[in-house]
Image: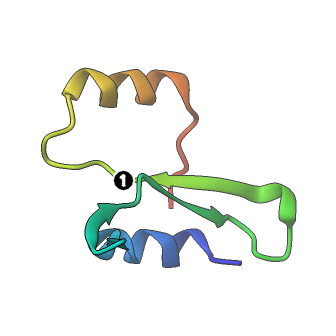
C-alpha cells in the first residue's frame, strides 16, 4: 500500500516502458490511511498538454483532498 504523499512524490517519474516504448501512468492508486483499505484514492497525473477543460471537469466531478 502506498500513502497519498508517497504517490504525489512519484508524479515526476510517472512513466516507464512497455515493449521498449515509453509509456505514462495516468494515475497512482494510494491510501489516505494505509491501515484502512476503504480510504483508497487516486492521484491523477496531469500532463502539460492536457486540455484545461478536462481538468475543470475533474475538479467539479471529484472530491479533492487537502493535505
Relative horizontal placement of residue 26, taking residue 54 as reference (left or right): right
Of residue 24 and residue 67, the one placed in the foreground of this image is 24
Q: Indicate whether 44 appears above or below 67.
A: above
Quadrant of the image containing the N terminus: bottom right
Coordinates of residue 52 in the picture (x, y in percent): 21, 28
Q: In the picture shown, does residue 48 fall above or below 50?
A: below
Residue farthest along the left direction in this orientation: 49
**Residue at numbered disc 1:** 45
Which residue is at a point 57% across and 68% down the rendered structure image? Answer: 4
Q: Nearer the viewer, residue 51 or 36?
A: 51
The one of 49 and 24 positioned closer to us in this rendering? 24
Query: Element under label 1?
Result: loop
Q: Is residue 18 left or right of residue 61?
A: left
Task: Identify the residue at image location x=36%, y=71%.
Answer: 19
Residue 10 position, x and y percent, is 39, 76
Q: Quadrant of residue 29?
A: bottom right
- Give the residue drawn at x 42%, y 29%: 59
Color encoding of the figure:
rainbow
Q: Is residue 42 above or below residue 30?
A: above
Q: Residue at x 14, y 47 (%)?
A: 48
Residue at the limit of the structure toward the front, as seen here: 19
Where is residue 51 shown, x and y percent of the image?
A: 20, 28
Classify residue 13 by image quadrant: bottom left
Amino acid at each position: 500500500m502506498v500513502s497519498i504523499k508517497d504517490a504525489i512524490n512519484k508524479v515526476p517519474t510517472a512513466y516507464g516502458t512497455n515493449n521498449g516504448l515509453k509509456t505514462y501512468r495516468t494515475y497512482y492508486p494510494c491510501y489516505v490511511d494505509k491501515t484502512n483499505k476503504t480510504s483508497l484514492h487516486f492521484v491523477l497525473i496531469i500532463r502539460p498538454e492536457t486540455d484545461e477543460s478536462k481538468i475543470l471537469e475533474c475538479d467539479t466531478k471529484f472530491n479533492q483532498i487537502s493535505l
